[in-house]
Image (cartoon, rainbow, N blue to C red):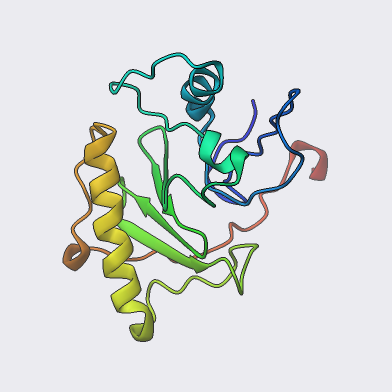
Amino acid sequence: MGKQNLYEEFKSPLVVASPGIPHGRSDALVYLFDLFPTCCELAGVPISPELEGASLAPIIRGDRPRVRAWLFAAYRDCQRMVRDEQWKLFWYPRVERFQLFDLASDPWEIDDLAGKPEHSARLAELTKQLAAEQRRFDDPHAPPRLAATRPAQHAPRAAQPSADDN
């Protein structure tokens, strides 16, 4: 079934190797659909402005550390996510709830900061960016309304007895 949510290191690993490409490492935020414009640029082929992806050639050449500041992802109609290098915001459209994580201090996404007053400005900033990314990718779910939402609450399910327990 594969991965069924947007938690845990949602950042596509990508390896680019070829003669003439210097060895190195980057923590740039990339999409897999960046590969086509990257290959086009490296091959000297014009890149259509209609493509959603960005060429990673400037990163590969060492000209720039990144080609974007944000990543957006959606899982079905139940999860939306936007992240930058430090912060990650989840939006649950079905229940209109958020989760906010500081990936620098909480890489395992355990401590939800969405309900903490000291993070309200960050929540508002990321919510605005989420709405912008949803519009950019024609996401059919309405952008979140911050005032009408509340932080998600973690409530682990109680263990259900199995047939073997009887």
Q: Is residue 53 left or right of residue 126?
A: right
Percent x, y for residue 109?
Answer: 58, 63
Q: Nearer the viewer, residue 10 or 141?
A: 10
Count of number-bearing discs: 0
Percent x, y for residue 104?
Answer: 59, 70
Task: Give the quadrant of the N terminus.
Answer: top right
Q: Is residue 35 left or right of residue 23?
A: left
Percent x, y for residue 141?
Answer: 24, 38
Percent x, y for residue 75?
Answer: 44, 36
Q: Nearer the viewer, residue 45 or 125?
A: 45
| Snapshot quadrant of residue 3 | top right
- Point 51% across, 49% down: residue: 64
Q: Is residue 41 left or right of residue 150?
A: right
- Point 31% across, 77% down: residue: 120
| Snapshot quadrant of residue 165 | top right
| Image vertical order of residue 115 relative to residue 70, above or below | below
Task: Give the quadrant of the C terminus.
Answer: top right
| Image vertical order of residue 91 relative to residue 148, above or below | above
Q: Nearer the viewer, residue 123 or 92?
A: 123
| Image vertical order of residue 144 relative to residue 42, above or below | below
- Point 23% across, 32% down: residue: 140
